[in-house]
Image: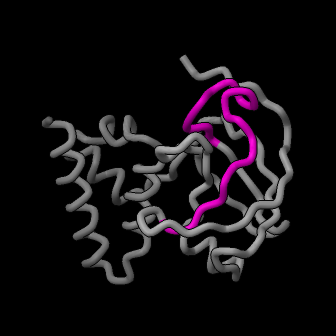
Amino acid sequence: MAKQYINPGPLTFTAVIRENMTTGSYINFPYDLKETFGYGNLVPFKAIFDDRIHYQGSLAKMGGPQAMILLRNDVAAQLGKQPGQAVEVVLELDDKPREVAVPEDAKAALQEAGLYDAFERLAYTHRKEYVTWIEEAKKPETRLSRIAKMLDMIAAKTSK
């Protein structure tokens, strides 16, 4: 059964980019997750930073009381901002199913290995990471190698 979130509508706030040695850059989320969305951790969202950079992720508490938005390096680079600088955020709940378009060659390999169902059961983030890793290969042989490694990693997870 899917989680039933409270949808407060778009939330707009200004936050300072922070840096942590273990997680990289992040932004503190200034609202209480439980009061705002009805769940206390891992709330899916979509956001627009500085009215131009679109981002999708999950609000997470990483050991502290306040939820944070992890700021991937590519997003920080697009913003052109460093820790200590402010960013405008418009954030909304994203409770729609998150789909990953699996490239045909990877899908065929997963099906042939009998691992497609196991792949589909992975968290959205893991499926997206595998697909991005494969699609970023510059050479055909690198792509094939990454598909083979993906199969090995999924097979190892399912055998545990």
Q: Is residue 147 left or right of residue 127?
A: left
Residue 43, position in %: x, y? 61, 37
Residue placed most toward the observer, 57 or 142: 57
Residue placed most toward the observer, 137 or 37: 37
Splitting the image into 4 quarters, where does residue 48 fall?
bottom right
Splitting the image into 4 quarters, where does residue 104 fall?
bottom left
Residue 30, position in %: x, y? 74, 47
Q: Is residue 65 left or right of residue 143?
A: right
Coloration of the structure image = one colour
| Residue at (44% x, 69% y) in the render | 21
Residue 32, position in %: x, y? 71, 35
Q: Is residue 39 above or below residue 50?
A: above
Which quarter of the figure is the C terminus placed in?
top left
Q: Is residue 89 left or right of residue 105?
A: right
| Residue at (49% x, 47% y) in the render | 62
Query: Residue 98 colored magenta?
Result: no
Residue placed most toward the observer, 96 or 31: 31
Q: Which residues are magenta?
A: 24-44
Q: Is residue 142 above or below residue 22?
A: below
| Residue at (62% x, 67% y) in the render | 18
Q: Is residue 50 left or right of residue 135?
A: right
